């Protein structure tokens, strides 16, 4: 197969409100992960490692940090004369038009159908920008060609009790999809759609501008309608590590999953390098009294305190006497002397004051009152550039919104389930 | 002012023994993730100078690969940028670079082509952070023909430097290369020169016939002082070090671990840029103990590391101990192995249970190179394989690429001061 035979569309416009402070300031695809990466790095690296060098990224919600991260695509060798990276943002199609935001995955692709029509590749690979996995798309594309499918959906086996969160496919013996259920209450199988679709390009263009022109979402509308219409849809099974960072708990678990001696997701693989844009930083510096156990530390971090089972991003400073336990600390955050963090996600450039206690057990362990169905697993979140005052004591499921200043803390005691600050 | 920087990077650095056996001194790794030349190159671009010639001669391959098209330093440019200037064969004359000034003399046409009016001549061998702009400014204010950066050195060390005697304006009255008696003051030449391009060309043309091994310290500066050219000094009082010996390389490395290291790599206002492979965060295992050390991305530590510098991809097995050592890229340290005051080059394998840097007889110098290895540091060359359970003493030199068989004549102990060489 010609290496340029597929154009990739990465959907990176979602607002993902379930990720709380992490997506208050950026789109989900741009959330930092594994210390030095951003989530979209996995999909972008999968593309170039699979020889796909024509890649479009569809943005809508808070795209600035994503745009800056991708830039001209240099870290992925996507700064090219032919193909390369295309950032597709919403735009006015005629003067004076009312703003029309894209209302779903298929709606976003339809919005940029003119781009798709101009491409030369026979196949379109549609990807989510918010999944963490390593996958060689060449095998998927080959499967699509071999089965002469109209659409191929990559699927992953999930536990039965999780199936309700996914689009579930039912296939015949050849792998042809006979039935598709979006987020079913009573799933008929445990093969979940990974949100990775291969379409024949002309088929997709024709469908989205013809029979499916009112359909907004691939999972909810397009795929079920195509199955209904008797088109050839096939499921491509993927057996590797794959996770959809949809919630704060999933984000924390995926980061913690990297700490095992043999992690399910090996990122130190010279055969499948995950590329990212990184700032030039000196090595990690560990002080005389540093205690580090079972953690990841990135270049530029300076640690004089204690770090246990945590992921520490570039440039983080952890002062003497500070303790960081089961936490994720993002770039250039500062943990001052004597502060203690337990199961906390600290966003970039946040400051935890001296002797502060964040993630303290109390009797209630109450869910967050603003997001009770999502923030109820005991994780406390400190937003970007927020400042927790010295000596403050924060419980669990607490949210400190981005840019919150110390003055917003009316009391040193912040009980579990509280939210401090306002959404930016 | 149109400035071109010329970096002399042809030095063999023979006193660094095996570290410079396969690479020029400027390409010797330093501080975990850098190479020595990164400091000079970063100083150049951080000073706003984007036209750079690098003069290579001795084993240039790893240096040339490191520099590439100059991307990490933003020197991949349409105008200016980085140029590797290697010795070349002409119709009439064909010579190696026979001296520092001869190297520049053979590249005068490059300087002319850049239409530079000011030439900044630098050495690729030194570790320091310096803004060249104030020096260029002073050069301009003095309307100088040549400005020499100088620093104060202890009187007992003046015999190692070119020593300048100046008037109160900083104009050079006398220049003595490596004075035998300490009566010339202690202003030492740092090997950093700013020349008026036209004067440089004239002087080199005048001297080249007489002195084939044309050298700035030996010939050019004395000549210019004698004929009363406008030669001035620029005083520098920051941190500057020439890591010319194994002892100073080790000492300078250990100084990076001091709480207030004079070479502040963590200052974001003067970033030292380098070329690095994309590697994930450093991983510190649950059994690990790491204090007062620098650790790079891609390192995996499952043993004990104290007061050491570990480059990307170094693997420290459980039970291994690394103490006061410098370990370069992708070296594997087996379970239970102990390294004490060792400099280990890249891709070395330290067998399980091996003890390298063993015993208290620090002062037994290396028999073959007593002038180079006499402070108790043992050095392991690139790609050497050290057999399991062997003891290796102090001031031992293990040549690059030796296999386990090379150790057989020594039995279970390589005594201090020995050299282990393979079959060539």
Image (cartoon, rainbow, N blue to C red):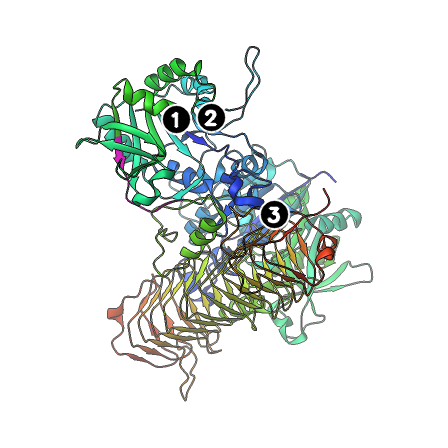
Q: Which residues are magenta?
A: B233-241
Q: Nearer the viewer, residue A107 or B295?
A: B295
Mark 2 touching mark 1, by CB under 8 A?
yes
Which of label 2 and label 1 is nearer to you?
A: 1
Which label's residue is closer to the chain start, 2 or 1?
2
Depicted B57 relative to depicted A187: above or below: above
Can you tell which quarter of the image residue B172 is in?
A: top left
- Residue B238 in the magenta stretch? The answer is yes
Q: Which residue is mark 2?
A: B99
Which residue reaches farthest right?
A173
Spatial separation of the CA atoms under disc 2 and disc 1: 10 Å
Asked if residue A163 shows in the view, the reply is yes
- Residue A78 against residue B283 in the figure, above or below: above
| Element on which disc 1 rests | helix
Can residue A128 be spotted in the picture? no
Residue B78 sits inside the magenta stretch: no
Q: Residue beneath label 1, please?
A: B218
| Residue at x 61% of width, y 47% of height | A208
Question: In the image shown, does A288 or B377 lie closer to the viewer?
Answer: B377
Report which residue position mark 3 lands on: A208
Residue A223, image quadrant:
bottom right
Which element carries disc 3, helix, strand or loop? helix
Looking at the image, is mark 2 or mark 3 nearer the viewer? Answer: 2
Q: Are marks 2 and 3 in contact (CB under 8 Å)?
A: no
Q: Residues within 10 Å of mark 2 (few under 14, many from 20)?
A: some
- Picture quarter with the N terminus of chain A: top right
Percent of width and height locating residue A127: 60, 52
């Amino acid at each position: 197969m010609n290496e340029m035979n597929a154009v990739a569309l990465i959907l990176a416009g979602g607002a993902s409100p379930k990720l709380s402070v992490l997506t208050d300031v950026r789109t989900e695809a741009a959330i930092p992960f594994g210390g030095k990466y951003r989530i979209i790095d996995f999909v972008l690296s999968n593309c170039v490692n699979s020889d796909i060098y024509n890649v479009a990224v569809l943005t809508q919600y808070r795209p600035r940090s994503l745009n800056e991260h991708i830039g001209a695509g240099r870290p992925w060798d996507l700064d090219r004369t032919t193909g390369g990276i295309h950032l597709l943002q919403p735009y006015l199609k005629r003067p004076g038009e009312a703003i029309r935001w894209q209302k779903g995955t298929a709606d976003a692709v339809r919005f940029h159908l003119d781009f798709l029509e101009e491409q030369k590749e026979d196949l379109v690979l549609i990807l989510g920008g918010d999944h963490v996995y390593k996958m060689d798309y060449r095998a998927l594309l080959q499967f699509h060609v071999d089965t002469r499918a109209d659409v191929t959906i990559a699927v992953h086996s999930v536990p039965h009790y999780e199936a309700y969160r996914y689009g579930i496919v039912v296939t015949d013996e050849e792998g042809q999809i006979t039935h598709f259920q979006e987020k079913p209450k009573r799933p008929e199988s445990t093969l979940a759609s990974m949100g990775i679709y291969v379409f024949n390009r002309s088929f997709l263009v024709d469908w989205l501008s013809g029979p499916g022109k009112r359909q907004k979402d691939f999972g909810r509308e397009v795929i079920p309608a195509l199955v209904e219409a008797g088109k050839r849809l096939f499921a491509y099974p993927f057996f590797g590590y794959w996770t959809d960072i949809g919630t704060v708990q999933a984000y924390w678990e995926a980061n913690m999953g990297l700490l095992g001696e043999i992690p399910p997701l090996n990122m130190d693989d010279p055969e499948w390098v995950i590329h990212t844009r990184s700032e030039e930083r000196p090595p990690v510096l560990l002080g005389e009294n540093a205690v580090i156990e079972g953690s990841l530390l990135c270049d530029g971090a300076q640690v004089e305190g204690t770090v246990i089972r945590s992921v520490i991003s570039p440039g983080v400073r952890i002062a003497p006497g500070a303790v960081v336990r089961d936490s994720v600390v993002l770039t250039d955050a500062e943990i001052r002397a004597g502060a203690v963090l337990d199961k906390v996600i600290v966003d970039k450039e946040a400051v935890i004051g001296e002797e502060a206690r964040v993630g303290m057990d109390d009797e209630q362990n109450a869910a967050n009152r603003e997001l009770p169905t999502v923030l109820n697993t005991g994780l406390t979140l400190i937003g970007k550039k927020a400042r927790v005052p010295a000596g403050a004591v924060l419980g669990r499921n607490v949210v400190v919104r981005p840019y919150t200043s110390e003055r917003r803390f009316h009391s040193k005691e912040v009980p579990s389930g509280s939210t401090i600050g306002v959404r930016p | 002012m149109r400035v071109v920087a010329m970096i002399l990077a042809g030095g063999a650095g023979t006193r660094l023994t095996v570290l410079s056996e396969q690479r020029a001194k400027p390409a010797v790794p330093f501080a975990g993730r850098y190479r020595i030349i990164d400091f000079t190159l970063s100083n150049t671009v951080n000073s706003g100078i984007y036209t750079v010639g690098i003069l290579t001669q001795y084993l240039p391959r790893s240096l040339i690969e490191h520099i590439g098209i100059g991307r990490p330093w933003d020197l991949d440019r349409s105008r200016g940028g980085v140029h590797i200037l290697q010795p070349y064969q002409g119709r009439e004359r064909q010579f190696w670079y026979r001296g520092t000034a001869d190297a520049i003399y053979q590249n005068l046409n490059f300087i002319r082509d850049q239409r530079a009016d000011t030439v900044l001549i630098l050495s690729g061998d030194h570790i320091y952070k310096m803004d060249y702009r104030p020096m260029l400014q002073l050069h301009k204010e003095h309307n100088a023909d040549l400005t020499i950066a100088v620093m104060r050195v202890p009187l007992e060390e003046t015999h190692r430097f070119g020593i300048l005697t100046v008037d109160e304006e900083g104009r050079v009255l006398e220049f003595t290369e490596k004075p035998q008696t300490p009566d010339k003051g202690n202003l030492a030449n740092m090997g950093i020169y700013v020349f008026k391009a036209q004067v440089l060309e004239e002087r080199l043309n005048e001297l080249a016939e007489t002195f084939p091994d044309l050298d700035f310290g030996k010939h050019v500066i004395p000549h210019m002082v004698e004929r009363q050219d406008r030669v001035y000094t620029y005083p520098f009082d920051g941190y500057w070090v020439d890591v010319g010996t194994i002892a100073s390389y080790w000492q300078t490395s250990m100084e990076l671990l001091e709480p207030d290291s004079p070479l502040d790599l963590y200052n974001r206002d003067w970033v030292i840029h380098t070329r690095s492979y994309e590697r994930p965060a450093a991983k510190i295992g649950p059994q690990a103990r790491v204090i007062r050390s620098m650790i790079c991305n891609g390192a995996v530590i499952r043993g004990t590391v104290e007061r050491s510098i570990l480059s990307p991809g170094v693997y420290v097995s459980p039970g291994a101990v690394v103490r006061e050592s410098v370990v370069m890229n992708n070296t594997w340290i087996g379970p239970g192995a102990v390294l004490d005051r060792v400099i280990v080059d890249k891709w070395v394998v330290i067998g399980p249970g091996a003890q390298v840097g063993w015993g208290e007889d620090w002062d037994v110098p290396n028999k073959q190179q007593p002038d180079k290895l006499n402070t108790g540091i043992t050095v392991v060359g690139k790609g050497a394989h050290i057999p399991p359970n062997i003891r290796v003493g102090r001031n031992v030199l293990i040549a690059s690429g030796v296999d386990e068989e090379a150790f057989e004549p020594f039995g279970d102990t390589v005594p201090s001061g020995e050299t282990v060489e393979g079959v060539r």
